[in-house]
Image (cartoon, helix red, strand yellow):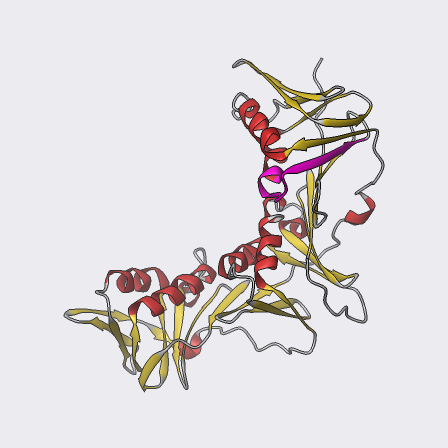
Amino acid sequence: MKIIADKEKLLENLNTVSHAVSSRTTQQILECILIQAEDSLRVYGNDLELGIESADIEAEIEEPGSVALEAKIFLDMVRRMPAGLIQIEADHQNITKIKSGRTEFKVLGQPGDEFPIPEKMKQDLGFETNAADFKEMIRQTIFSVAIDESKPVLTGELLQIKDGCIHLVSVDGFRISYRRGKEAMIEPEAVKAVVVPAKSLNELGRILPSDGESRLNFYIQDSHILFRTENYTLISRLLEGEFIRYNQIFSEDFSTLINIDRQQLLMSLDRASLLTRSNKNNPVKLSIGQDTVVITSNTETGTSYDETSADIDGSPLEIAFNPKYLIDALRVIDDENVVMTFTGALSPCILRGASIDYYKYLILPLRLRN
């Protein structure tokens, strides 16, 4: 194999596919990036759970072929090469020469045909949506995926196609994050719902462009899902198990409702949380009156008091939360005001944008100490 490619274009693609390279494996080939030069140049990373493939990279292919190179050292070599064109040449023993200007490395690679390229998926059950909106859907839900692997299905997000749009839901046992896609789509004959690992969605969110024109296609087949953008293809395994029936939990009933400035509430909670960060069991208390919300914290370190004006409907209420859960949701809401509804001091709070209905969050309270 012998190719010549621009350093910056090659490095951009290598950086992206490297996120699918395994860092903990007994299979040395999974620590590699595959360079494949046939009719075009492509690079691959695959840890058997997640695979990322580049689109065609502009290059001059002098001799077709393939080689798998250890990802970390290969990336470091390319980064340190001078700007301009890089020549990569591998012989029949996979000894690979990487050269640019007067700089040259030689490393031993592995046979390219031993690299596990993800199998081609049928693309008969496919969907299309706006790439930037799906990127936002991930950003506004991914933070509440479970870290504890005792329930593996909760370490991913539910991706559901129903009612003519996409729904993305994450649950960690203490909160639920929900986001509906803005774009209508053709609904499949049967409601389709799969659970995608958080790592795969994180990498997809990193890849997706932010412009409003780009499209994202995805295809579901058996135990895998394929996402395709203009520049990359990502294939992920799906998680098995029964996901929580989130629709039954979001209630429209309330005994107390507040409409409050998002940024003011966020800053008040952030200040109160300064005293609770060393101990997750120390909550912040919200005291909801007629037209104000008082936020207090009381720990061994000290106390805090913060008061914020709000439009309030219903009964006065005192309720406590882990401030991190409220802060996480408030940071991703794109609305000037938020609406919070409550049915009691020990019942979940539901948090929504005041004027945007694409997302909603459910957060469990903590028991108030006497």
**Measured from the top left, where is residue 353 in percent x and y?**
69, 42
Of the 4 image quadrants, the one containing the N terminus is: bottom left
How many numbered discs?
0
**Measured from the top left, where is residue 316 in percent x and y?**
79, 20
The reply, left or right, for residue 267 in relation to residue 84 is: right
Residue 331 position (above or below residue 206): above
Of the 4 image quadrants, the one containing the C terminus is: top right
**Measured from the top left, where is residue 338 in percent x and y?**
68, 37
15 or 164, which lies in front?
164
**Residue at the image position 77 percent from the left and 61 percent from the top:** 162
**Measured from the top left, where is residue 263 in percent x and y?**
58, 33
Residue 348 position (above or below residue 333): above
Residue 159 position (above or below residue 307): below
Residue 150 among those drawn in magenta? no
316 or 321, which lies in front?
316
Location of residue 181 (image quadrant): bottom right
Q: Is any atom of residue 173 visible in this view?
A: no
The reply, left or right, for residue 270 in relation to residue 163 is: left
Residue at the left extreme, as displayed: 102
125 or 167, which lies in front?
167
270 or 293, which lies in front?
293
Magenta highlight range: 329-342
Q: Is any atom of residue 301 visible in this view?
A: yes
Residue 259 position (above or below residue 105): above
Location of residue 250 (image quadrant): top right
Residue 331 among those drawn in magenta? yes
